[in-house]
Image (cartoon, grey):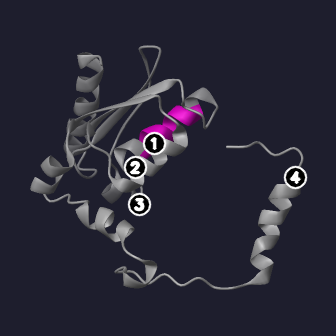
Amino acid sequence: MDPQLMQAAVDQSVLALESNDSGPFGAVVVLDGKVIATGYNTVVHDSDPTAHAEVNVIRKAGQALGTFDLSQCELYTSCEPCPMCLGAIYWARFKHVYYANDRQDAANIGFDDNFIYTELELPMSERRIPFTKVELASALGAFEAWTAKVDKQEY
């Protein structure tokens, strides 16, 4: 863990506040000790509920490196990632994640993700937002085409 890199992520969270873009969250992607991408939360600015600091910086790092596989990279983030960002982190395959504030610190300022963790434990039929599986035979067509595709790039 490099304290300067952790500070860089925190500095991004301050930039978010100064830019009036959204909540105080920032992140930095690092490869071999070098900063590849920086970013912060732009949910309000972009009218995009997925524009969390971690998602924004993962997108930038992927573009900068020309790959979706960030398994050689580390992520420094100003706060413990929410469930959505956690999913993105696992899809990106980071080798390590460092964070400063934790989920309770975030909850204390009005960013409480615990309801999402609770929802994930519930059966679909008991969640706040109804989810209904629609049986449609043709829906498997794209999956079957993917399975048969010989030149696909696995991810």
Secondary structure type for disc 2: helix
Quadrant into which the C terminus falls: top right
Query: Which residue in the structure is indicated by mark 3?
Result: 48
Question: Looking at the rendering, which quadrant does residue 11 occupy?
Answer: top left
**Residue at horizontal 39%, vertical 80%?**
129
Residue pushed farthest top? 33
Decide which of 73, 41 is in the foreground and name it.
73
Secondary structure type for disc 1: helix
Query: Which residue in the structure is indicated by mark 1?
Result: 89
- Label for residue 149? 4
- Magenta part of the protein: which range? 55-63
User: How crowded is the residue under tag 2: few (<14 C-alpha within 10 Å), some, or many (20+)?
Assistant: some
Q: Amino acid at mark 1?
A: Ile
Decide which of 11, 58 is in the foreground and name it.
58
Query: Which residue in the structure is indicated by mark 2?
Result: 85
Please give the count of numbered marks on the rendered protein: 4
Mark 2 vs mark 3: in front: 2
Q: Position of residue 130 (x, y in %)?
A: 43, 84
Q: Going by the image, does 129 lie left or right of 151? A: left
Above or below: residue 32 compared with residue 133: above
First along the sequence among labels 2 and 3: 3
Are dots 2 and 1 in contact, CB under 8 Å? Answer: yes
Are dots 4 and 1 in contact, CB under 8 Å? Answer: no
Secondary structure type for disc 4: loop
Residue 62 included in the magenta stretch of the image: yes
First along the sequence among labels 4 and 1: 1
Q: Position of residue 28 (x, y in %)?
A: 37, 30
Are dots 3 and 4 in contact, CB under 8 Å? Answer: no
Secondary structure type for disc 3: loop
**Residue at horizontal 22%, vertical 32%?**
10
Kindly report the distance in space between the C-alpha atoms of the residues bearing marks 3 and 4: 33 Å
Mostly what secondary structure, the magenta segment?
Answer: helix
